[in-house]
Image (cartoon, rainbow, N blue to C red):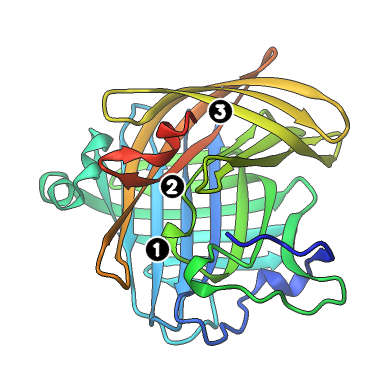
Amino acid sequence: MSTLPANYRLRLEPEDEYPHAPGEAANYNESMYFNVFDPARMAGGWFRIGNRPNEGYAEVSVCIYLPDGRIAFAFGRPKIAGNAAMDAGGLKVDVLEPFKRLRVTFSGQALLLARPFEMADPRRAYRENPSVPCSVDLVYEGVSPMYGGETVMADGSPIPVDPQKSFAKAHYEQHCAASGTIVLGGERHEIAGFGLRDKSWGPRYWQAIDWYRWCPMNFGRDFGMMLSVIGDGAGGARQGGMVFRDGAYDLITECAIESDWDAHGYQTALRSRIRTQSGRSYEVTGKVLSLIPLRNRRTAPDGSELHTRITEGMTEYRCGDLVGYGLSEYLDQIVDGQPNGKAAGY
């Protein structure tokens, strides 16, 4: 990831909720992501569509966590022509009102995993587990301000990026409430919970970041957090995120994360100490309830094989007397069989 110039600012407009002109970068990616966790039903999920119009396909992921520990998962790379809509492979995002209300729908097949760790070997997982019809219909309501935007120069002009080293040139997030239905085979789940959504656009390779820890969480409609620690590839890490409280975001200036691991090198628990711009301090613990390991592989120009692992854990969080739910998403480049972030002590 490149170093930002001193005289930059963040730009965000309602039009950014819709697709952008992709430009010429072959690896341009426009991504919308949503998660939701229902604290009463102990169920939830996340949904992502990433258009890669200059490569002619979209990345579509649907992941649903069920109360009994099963996970339903769908992934595809459907063909697309252009970047006119976030609508591919049965997954669709409709912007009902920018920054306020969006609708996420899906119709297709999903793999139903009684043992989600089997997704570490996708070919075997698909061969040995059933696929069932899946439909999703959720409406997301923003409960917080917007966080982030496109990084531009002070005069509004774009900042050049190296497509080979880029993860996104623009990114924003928002804490949300979400409600609707998820149907898997003959099972119908009414969902009413909280989550976080984000959007990014610009050139992206999943290997552009050495490792990160991304932990969005909600403790109700009025209190949530997003913890972010990103490895810089040189032994250091950038700490950030935000705390949603009293109707506003309080930016995180310090965010230390310690993780516990199982025999597979997947996170099982975490502890975080947080300090914000306002001077507030928090301690948060997380216990992973259900986890699925995913991966992305790419051959580099020099012929080397690059392997990125992304472990997605539905996580119960505690902050003082409050109990909340969210995700612990750990991305690591795998080198000599080991995740880089774990080797760095995170």
Q: Quadrant of residue 223?
A: top right
Q: Residue at x 76, y 28 (%)?
A: 275
Q: Quadrant of residue 250?
A: top right
Q: Residues within 10 Å of mark 3 (few under 14, many from 20)?
A: many
Cα–Cα span, label 1 and label 3:
26 Å
Closer to the chain start, of discs 3 and 2, is: 3
Nearer to the camera, 71 or 236 = 236
Residue at the top extreme, as displayed = 321
Closer to the chain start, of discs 2 and 1, is: 1
Q: Residues within 10 Å of mark 2 (few under 14, many from 20)?
A: many
Amino acid on which the number 2 mark rests in the picture: Ile
Q: Residues within 10 Å of mark 1 (few under 14, many from 20)?
A: many
What secondary structure is marked by label 1?
strand
In this rendering, would 123 be left or right of 174?
Answer: left
Which residue is tagged 3?
Answer: 39
Which residue is tagged 2?
Answer: 182
Which residue is tagged 1?
Answer: 60
Q: Quadrant of the N terminus?
A: bottom right
Q: Position of residue 173 (x, y in %)?
A: 67, 53
Cα–Cα span, label 3 and label 2:
15 Å
Amino acid on which the number 3 mark rests in the picture: Pro
Cα–Cα span, label 2 and label 1:
17 Å
Q: Residue at x 77, y 34 (%)?
A: 222
Amino acid on which the number 1 mark rests in the picture: Val
Q: Position of residue 346 (x, y in %)?
A: 49, 31
What secondary structure is marked by label 2?
strand
Q: Position of residue 171 (x, y in %)?
A: 65, 60
What secondary structure is marked by label 3?
loop
